[in-house]
Amino acid sequence: MSLHPLRRTMLALAAVFAACKSDRAPAPAASAPATSAATSAPAPVTVIATDFKLDMPAKVSAGAVTLRLVNNGKELHQAQIIRLDEGKTMADFQQAMKHEGPPPGWVRFVGGPNGVAPGQEATSTATLVPGHYLVVCSIPGTDGVPHIMKGMSLPFEVTGGTGAAAGALPVAEDTVLLADYSFHTSRPLTPGRHTILVENIAAQPHELVLLRLAPGKTVDDFGKWATTGGMKGPPPAMPLGGIGVIDAGGQGVFTADLTPGDYGLICFVPDAKDGKLHLMHGMVKQLEVS
């Protein structure tokens, strides 16, 4: 019996970050830039992750919100944002994960910081409309149980807003478009700090994991290692952040500090039609930073 697609989405991402746990911490994403298209800085919200708990304010103002994930635990953690339609609760979400069938229509994936190593931080910015949300960590522990099953899910409410300026994402000099099933970069990446806008122009949810490839390795090597290869041996790449799962039409911004070398982009979200991971449909891209 196949897993519920919603659970597969969580677990596919979880497996990658758990398997890449090593003595070398992944490079954290840099803080979001202070300048936005409307000269209004996104509201910073700190999410504290421990083993196995997430802590953040119960209420957040609507608009462009930068989540700063601080990992005070001993394991890898992430802060995936999920919006629930009116009247739905965290209990409804937990119940939905137990059943077969497509993800319920009242679950919205809104991005958020991807996995971060113990003692590290990562940030990403998303536009949040008023409503009820969850922040969750689906990365599994050393026992293989996803952290969300150990209580790492926390509801929060997005309220009010401070006008149109609050909805502006930070200015980005680079753009990556997520399609079915490909990544389209606006220009070659160069060494240094980059602020990257990620837009999902596809018909279904996607995510972006930024990889730093080991010498001589490819994105396909990493995809096979993380799936059919059973995650045996040294990982062919290390995740360096990116944007969590976002629905069709969604956007998010993250920053990355790049040094010369080979990088990759990959999507592990299960397909809405056949359940195969999007990387198996060719949603991978290799980049050289020079």
Image (cartoon, grey):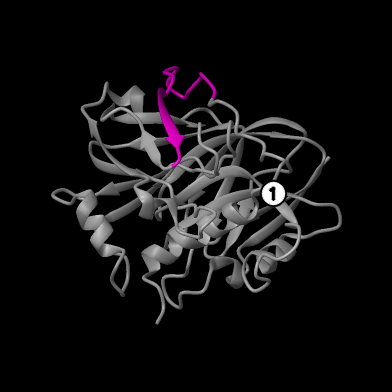
- Assess whether residue 78 is covered by the magenta stretch: no
Left-right relation of 177 to 65: right
Evaluate whether residue 105 shows in this view: no
SS for tag 1?
strand
Residue found at the very far front of the displayed protein: 143
Identify which residue, 199 or 231, lies in the foreground: 231
Q: Which residue is mark 1?
A: 238
Left-right relation of 255 to 217: left
Instruction: Tell me the amino acid under the disc marked 1.
Output: Met
What x and y, as percent, mark residue 128? 33, 36
Identify which residue, 15 or 222, lies in the foreground: 15
What are the residue bounds of the magenta stretch? Answer: 33-51
Indicate whether 119 appears above or below 81. above
Identify which residue, 74 or 251, lies in the foreground: 74
Taking the spot 41% from the left edge, 37% from the top edge, the residue there is 126
What x and y, as percent, mark residue 150? 37, 51
